[in-house]
Image (cartoon, rainbow, N blue to C red):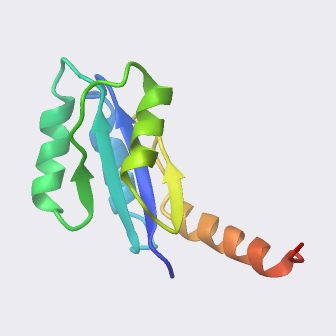
Amino acid sequence: MPKVSVILPTYNGEKYICQQIDSILSQTCKDWELYIHDDGSTDNTIAAVESYVEKYPDKIHLIDGKSTGGAKYNFFYLFGQVEAPYYMTCDQDDVWLEKKIELTYDTVSYTHLTLPTIL
């Protein structure tokens, strides 16, 4: 299965971020990497993310960069920093069901294989 890059913009998400990252770590599909960019949090969001980066350096990455000025621009920034065959986006206050990546990938793969190619 090709690698899936999960992009996660954060801003003052200390209350939720650990639960979201834990739900990504619990995925049945393990062929993913998580990329996080913080938009200038003033709470302990970055410290929480850094603790995960330290525990899972091959899976979770904190992307450095200046504040982008909002969630939409933070997503755009992350898309510009990460290259992957497949992307998934999430918010810091999401909690993913354990088969989210697996089922999403399977659906995309099935659709790609069954739709006619238009030249």
29 vs 76: above or below: below
- Identify the residue shown where x is 34% and y is 56%: 34
Asked which quadrant contains residue 115, the reply is: bottom right
Q: Residue at x 24, y 54 (%)?
A: 61
- Can you give x and y, in whole percent of width and height, for residue 83 in the image? 42, 61
Q: Nearer the viewer, residue 69 or 55?
A: 69
x and y percent of residue 47 in the render? Answer: 12, 36
The count of marks equals 0
Between 116 and 36, the one lying in front of the other is 116
Q: Residue at x 25, y 45 (%)?
A: 63
| Image position of 49 with respect to 41: above or below | below
Q: In the drawing, does residue 112 fall left or right of residue 34? A: right
Residue at point 45%, 47% (across, down): 79
Q: Is residue 95 above or below residue 40?
A: below
Percent from the top left, x then y, of residue 91?
Answer: 45, 37
Quarter of the figure with residue 8 = top left
In the image: residue 100, left or right of residue 41: right
Judge from the rendering whether residue 46 lies leftward or rightward of residue 12; answer left or right: left
The quarter of the rendered structure image containing the C terminus is bottom right
Task: Please determine whether, in this image, residue 119 is positioned above or below residue 86.
Answer: below
User: Outermost residue toward the front?
Assistant: 119
**Residue 59 locus on image (x, y percent):** 26, 64
